[in-house]
C-alpha cells in the first residue's frame, strides 16, 4: 500500500487493483476509482472526547454550499462539503 491509498476499483466491472499498481484505466477500458484506507487516515474518537463542529458557508443563494469539520483536541477527525436548499416553511410541512 502507498501512503493511505488502498487500491483502485473499476467503475464498470468492479475489478480491484492494489494501491501500488500504476494504471489509469481498467483492463476493460473503464475509469478507476481511488479507494483509501480511511481507518488509517482518521484519528479514533473515543467516548469522553469533546467534539467541536464548525460549518463554513462557501456559496450562498437558493442552494448553499458549505464545508463542515469535526475536530477533537484541535485535530480534524472528519470533514465534508455539502449542499442545502432553502424552502418556504409552508411547503416543508
Image (cartoon, grey):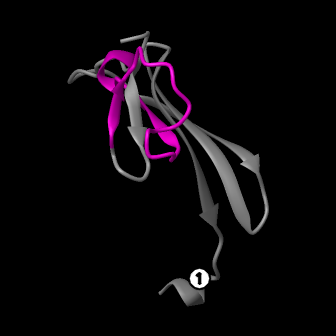
Q: Return the residue nearer the eye: 20 or 4.
A: 20
- Quadrant showing the N terminus: top left
The residue beneath circle 1 is: 89
Chain part drawn in magenta: 15-41
In the image, residue 83 sits, relative to residue 56, either above or below, namely below
In the image, residue 51 sits, relative to residue 68, either above or below, namely above
Q: Return the residue nearer the eye: 77 or 35.
A: 35
Identified at 20% across, 24% down, the residue is 47
Specify whether residue 79 is painted magenta: no
Q: Where is residue 72 in the image (x, y as percent from the top left)?
A: 41, 19
Q: Where is residue 18 in the image (x, y as percent from the top left)?
A: 34, 22
In the image, residue 48 sits, relative to residue 79, either above or below, namely above
Q: Where is residue 52 in the image (x, y as percent from the top left)?
A: 46, 28
In the image, residue 52 sits, relative to residue 41, either above or below, namely below
**Label total for image:** 1
Q: Which residue lies furthest to the left in this view?
A: 47
Identified at 41% across, 31% down, the residue is 8
Q: Return the residue nearer the eye: 47 or 16.
A: 16
Residue 19, quarter of the rendered image = top left
User: For this view, does 44 lie left or right of residue 90?
Assistant: left
Identified at 70% across, 58% down, the residue is 64
Identified at 75% across, 69% down, the residue is 62
Amino acid at each position: 500500500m502507498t501512503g493511505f491509498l488502498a487500491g483502485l476499483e473499476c467503475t464498470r466491472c468492479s475489478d480491484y487493483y492494489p494501491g501500488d499498481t500504476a494504471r489509469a484505466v481498467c483492463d476493460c477500458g473503464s475509469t478507476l476509482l481511488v479507494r483509501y484506507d480511511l481507518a488509517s487516515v482518521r484519528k479514533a474518537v473515543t467516548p469522553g472526547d469533546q467534539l467541536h463542529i464548525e460549518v463554513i458557508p462557501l456559496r450562498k443563494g437558493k442552494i448553499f454550499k458549505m464545508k463542515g469539520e469535526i475536530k477533537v483536541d484541535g485535530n480534524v477527525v472528519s470533514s465534508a462539503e455539502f449542499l442545502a436548499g432553502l424552502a418556504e416553511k409552508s411547503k416543508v410541512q
